[in-house]
Amino acid sequence: MARTRVIKDIENLDQAIKAEQDVESGYHSVIDENLSYWMAVEEDVIDSYTRLIAASDSPEVRRTLERIVDDSEKHRRILEQVSTLLREIVTDEEKHAKMLTNLKSNLEKSVGGK
């Protein structure tokens, strides 16, 4: 099953530049904000459950909460890796926009200079 296109066909350099720039404003910033909140939730869980572990006399409660803390620490690391990978993608998109802008400028100069 084919997916619906998110952007229309790119037919010129202006559209290509805009498509590259829209990745940051339309996608990355929203995803990054949500990842930040999710990481904060994992940190809060770790902090709260660690205090519950220290306050609990029940070995079963401590074991269960320790497993959850371990998972939350793993989730936090994974989310940080995802955030880092997304920043790498955005860096590439910014580079692409600059490359296209330079190409457009060079083409305009060569057409205007003739």
Image (tube, rainbow, N blue to C red):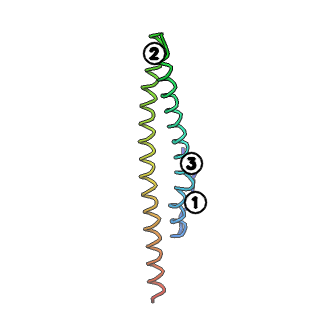
- In the image, residue 12 sits, relative to residue 58, either above or below, namely below
User: Mark 2 and mark 1: span between their CA atoms?
Assistant: 54 Å
The amino acid beneath tag 3 is: Val
For the N terminus, the image quarter is: top right
The kind of secondary structure element at disc 2 is: helix
The amino acid beneath tag 1 is: Lys
Task: Give the mark toward the camera: 2 or 1.
Answer: 2
Task: Give the mark toward the camera: 2 or 3.
Answer: 2
- In the image, residue 15 sits, relative to residue 71, either above or below, namely below
How crowded pointer 2 is (Cα within 10 Å; few <14, some 14-19, many 20+) is rated as some
The amino acid beneath tag 2 is: Arg
Which of these two is toward me, 18 or 11? 18
Q: Is residue 106 left or right of residue 38?
A: left
Q: Can you tell which mark lies on residue 57?
A: none
The residue that label 3 is drawn on is: 30
Looking at the image, tell me whether mark 1 or mark 3 is earlier in sequence order.
1
The residue that label 1 is drawn on is: 8
The kind of secondary structure element at disc 3 is: helix
User: Mark 2 and mark 3: span between their CA atoms?
Assistant: 36 Å
The residue that label 2 is drawn on is: 62
The part of the image, by quadrant, that contains residue 69 is top left
The kind of secondary structure element at disc 1 is: loop
The part of the image, by quadrant, that contains residue 25 is bottom right
CB under 8 Å between discs 2 and 3: no
Instruction: Count the labels in the image.
Output: 3
What residue is drawn where x is 42% and y is 47%? 85
Looking at the image, tell me whether mark 2 or mark 1 is earlier in sequence order.
1
